[in-house]
Image: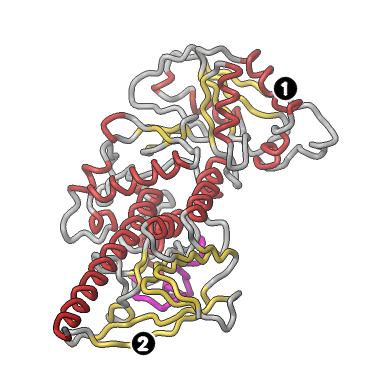
Amino acid sequence: MLNFDTLVIGGGLAGYCAAIKSAQQGLKTALISQGEGSLHFASGSIDVLAKHPTTFENVRFPLSAIEELPADHPHPYRKIGALETQASLDWFNGLMADQGIHFHQLDALENHWRITPFGTLKATWLSQVFCALLDDKPCDYERVIIVGVDGFRDFQPAVTAENIAKLPQFAGIAVKQAMVVLPETKANDGLRAKRAIDYARALREPLMYNAMRDQLMRIATPRDLVIMPSVFGNGDGQEYMARLQRDTHLQFHEVPTMPPSLLGIRIADALHRAFVEAGGTLLKGDAVTRAQMAKQETVDGQSQWVIERVHTRKMADLPLSAKHIILASGSFFSHGLVATADTILEPVFGLDVDAPAKRDDWYADRFLDAHPYIRSGVITDDNFAPSIQGTTVSNLSCIGGVLAGFDPVKEGSGGGISIATGFAAAHWHARALRAENATIGTQQQLDNEAVA
């Protein structure tokens, strides 16, 4: 049996944050990652809280809104609190900067508007440095140039330009479209209709990069905002964008494209590097198949479940055990939650789930309304400990998308909750372990003194 201090199940944003924070605190940590995680589909920005969880009104200051949540609200942010949420986001920002991925935000810790691939605006809190930060004031660019790449089908400049022209921030500013044509070579034969990552590989060639650079300089001036799809770099795209900006002196705004999203991949790659550097053990391409559990009594006579070991698909008969297990398996997309004909369940441990009782109640009447099933998830106490048929699982924490009590789509809160819950679960466990070790040490000292 392999023994760890912390075992994290799930290799998305929440799982990596928990695993990295745990390893940074000196705990022997393993991460079981079944796939690439949702970051490959992500915008590359970090949404903390765009709309209020109860009223769905726009939120300008997310941390203030978190601070005002009622004491009995089931939202994960309420359980963490505004101060630790901010600490987690500051930690994440610093972690990314150490890995060469830089973010920026508006002053006063407020949301800003980011431009989407469709030319609409979405509220977010942290954006990568080559994304323009917009507030409600008119912009002072001379023009907005929407640049497409000939043959690249995952970004449509005409759609973006049409919607950008309707935004009040760009009122009175000319919005233009342009197309960059990359030279055809043997190395990029068949590049048309490929994904962003294929263009990123091609643009590593000096011939291709120079063609992009020279055409952009003919298309735009330093007084323009150049909006273009993220097609530079696989993990190191910010370095390429910084070089392009130095060479052209242009102002760029990158937008994510259809998956895989290079802006999201940058974050995923940085998290992987940080975990390895912190000394963590990565079990990639693996999944938990079953768990062995035992019921115990606490000192006050209460029953609790304890996970003694878990088995995975690849490790076969070699089980894993840990003092603390963190479930970061995500929601429906990653099968952290599973919907059957009449119920919603958590498939790994069979944890208690909060979900609408009837399938007819899963959905709202209108497609764009908040659908109740999205708020479904695992029920936890204020320390993110779940239960099975009402009995607490004492050495398990649940974090990220598997949690109940929030709507990441309608609220615009998925990234922030993943970071904050992952950070908090690892931080709280390390603190509890230090306290436990201190108590054991004190007792041993007393026993030694008694013997002496």
Instruction: Give me the residue at 73% from left, 25% from top.
Output: 181
The answer to whether 428 appears left or right of 255 in the picture is left
Report the Cα–Cα distance between label 2 and label 1: 64 Å
Question: Does the stretch in magenta take in 236?
Answer: no
Q: Considering only order in the chain, which callout, 1 or 2, is on the residue closer to the N terminus?
A: 1
* Front of the two marks 2 and 1: 2
Towards the viewer: 72 or 384: 384
Q: Is residue 148 above or below residue 34?
A: above
Which span of residues is magenta-colored? 333-353
Question: Does the stretch in magenta take in 337?
Answer: yes
Identified by mark 2, the residue type is Ala
Mark 1, secondary structure of its residue:
helix
Q: Main secondary structure of the magenta part?
A: loop
Image quadrant where residue 364 sits: bottom left
Q: Quadrant of the C terminus?
A: bottom left
Instruction: Give me the residue at 65% from left, 13% from top.
Output: 218
- Marks 2 and 1: CB-CB under 8 Å? no
Observer able to see residue 261 = yes
Q: Position of residue 234 (x, y in %)?
A: 62, 41
Circle 1 residues within 10 Å: few <14, some 14–19, many ≥20: some
